[in-house]
Amino acid sequence: MKAPAISTLGLRTLELVGHLGRVALFLSHIGRVAVKKPYRLRRLVNEVFDSGVLSLAIVCLAGATVGAVLGLQGYNTLTRFGAAGSLGAVVGLSLVRELGPVLTALLVTGRAGSAMAAEIASMVTTGQIDGLRMMSIDPVDFVVAPKALAMLFVLPMLSALFIVFGFFGGYIVGVELLGLDGGTYLSSLENSIEFHDDVAQSLVKSVVFAALVGTIATYRGFHAEPTSAGVSAATTGTVVAASLAVLLFDYVITALWSV
Amino acid sequence: MDGGPADEFRVRFDGVHLRRGDRRVFDGLSCGFTRARITVVLGGSGAGKTTMLRLIGGLSRPESGSVYVAGEDVTRLSERELFRTRARIGMLFQGGALLDSMTIFENVALPLREHTQLSEHEIAAEVNRRLVAVGLPETGNLYPRELSGGMSRRAALARTIVTDPEIVLCDEPFSGLDPINVRRIEALLIDLNRRLGLTMIIASHHLASSLRMADRIVFLVDGRAIAGTPEDLLRSTDQRVLEFLRADSDGPDETSRHVPATASAGRV
């Protein structure tokens, strides 16, 4: 039974390589139409609204909750070492470097990425994509690029919002609930965060995640089987693949940054 | 090959082979579609009617063989080159394929906004003229989901012809419609053909309307085409054609009784 297993592995590998190649071509197609006229600003703004503004509430709420949990856990651990005064640093660094960009990307994948994939896939299913091609309108230019670019704008901003609400959640728990000094919390937070190590890393992460989520969601939607099962496969496939890609690239970027 | 000089055919299939999985859809298909005439593509479901239209539009590609549209082999064109050829073609999809995120007005205006330099004012006038022509004035602000099946089919027809294509492809324009809407769309298509001299290719399994409208019929069977006039088809002794005609008259359609009268009435 060895030979079949090996040939299956080979086949899977070839499929994966082919897949990655097609994703790369797709991505370069998006890039090409994005810099070419017409710019389709109105469609871009609509997409920013759809995936950004409508994700606001969930991102703010999640940010505040995560900040509050960090405050609680951090306080319990830090008081054992008599270091409760560094709570601001703990909350701040974990949010800025890791939790902000990663959790926002995961939330946006579930909220907006899946919606993007489903919308494009159902356009494939109902013939709207072929309809555009028959009207000599490039569907990647008209439908896909505005969605993928909107993700690039939206995710870094949502991530920043998540972080701010996280600081706030940590403040509520640490200062208002557990009685830390407000000034200590804020100055520890302020002193620990540096631009190059922390803020820039956070920004780079969220931009890379945005590119990943936007590309995977639109690629899966655009290449969906034209059936209702195809729409659901594109949607779940997007959530799984984008989430894993975000976590994987999170490690890669963190590792590269500390070199 | 199919009789007559090749130039008479605006669209021509030449030895097209296509396979779907294990099934041969086209097995050396050769046939032609005459300029400025209505040709109906008949055949059972799965005979490849829709596939034929997709090949003409360059949306699918055959394994071998050529498809000539206005003298150009579309099977050898890149997607970008196809955009030029498609400017001559309007395609009415089975579901209409209107963009459901846009209003009817925006849908019909879209090809004009993308491909012409017309001002917003001129576009509005043109779109409204087309909507009136298909019997849908005052629907511009509605979304496709707010229209009935027949209405959205007519709106899609307005979008198909708004750029004045010379070749119009219709995929099952009558399926799922009540008899009144069938007649209405039929009349619109015939009017377009007679008035503007459009080359029309209509994929349909609706035998009654096919016989009423068609100048020529291309009957798809076993991956090949049998072409002729509607009379040729009715007089045919080919077992497969007879089977199709008989099966249809057994069905719920009131086809067979009306065939002789309407067939001649359709071609004055």
Image (cartoon, coloured by chain):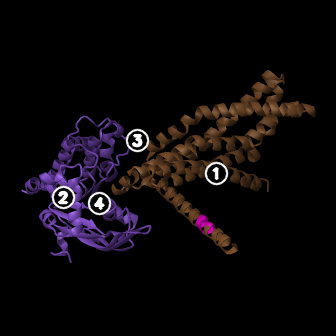
Are the two marked residues, 1 and 4, in contact with CB atoms closer than 8 angstroms? no
User: Is B47 situated left or right of A160 in this image?
Assistant: left
User: Is A227 situated left or right of A196 in this image?
Assistant: left
Q: Position of residue B132 (x, y in %)?
A: 20, 40
Which of the two residues, B244 or A15, is positioned nearer the viewer here? B244
Discs 1/4, front: 4
Q: Is residue B231 visible in this depiction of the protein?
A: yes
Secondary structure, magenta segment, majority class: helix
Residue found at the very far left of the displayed protein = B268
Q: What chain does badge 3 belong to? A: B
The label number, if any, that marks residue B240 in the structure image: none
The label number, if any, that marks residue B44 in the structure image: 4
Label 2 crowding class (10 Å Cα cut-off): few <14, some 14-19, many 20+? many
Amino acid carrying mark 3 in the image? Ser
Quarter the C terminus of chain B occupies: bottom left
**Distance between mark 1 and mark 4 Cα atoms:** 51 Å
The label number, if any, that marks residue B198 in the structure image: 2
Mark 4 or mark 3: whose residue is earlier in sequence = 4
Q: Are labels 1 and 4 on one chain?
A: no
Q: Is residue B30 above or below residue A255?
A: below
Amino acid carrying mark 2 in the image? Leu
Q: What chain does badge 1 belong to? A: A
Label 4 crowding class (10 Å Cα cut-off): few <14, some 14-19, many 20+? some
Quarter the N terminus of chain B occupies: bottom left
Q: Looking at the image, which residue is at 56% across and 45% down?
A: A113
Colour displayed for chain B in the image of the structure: purple
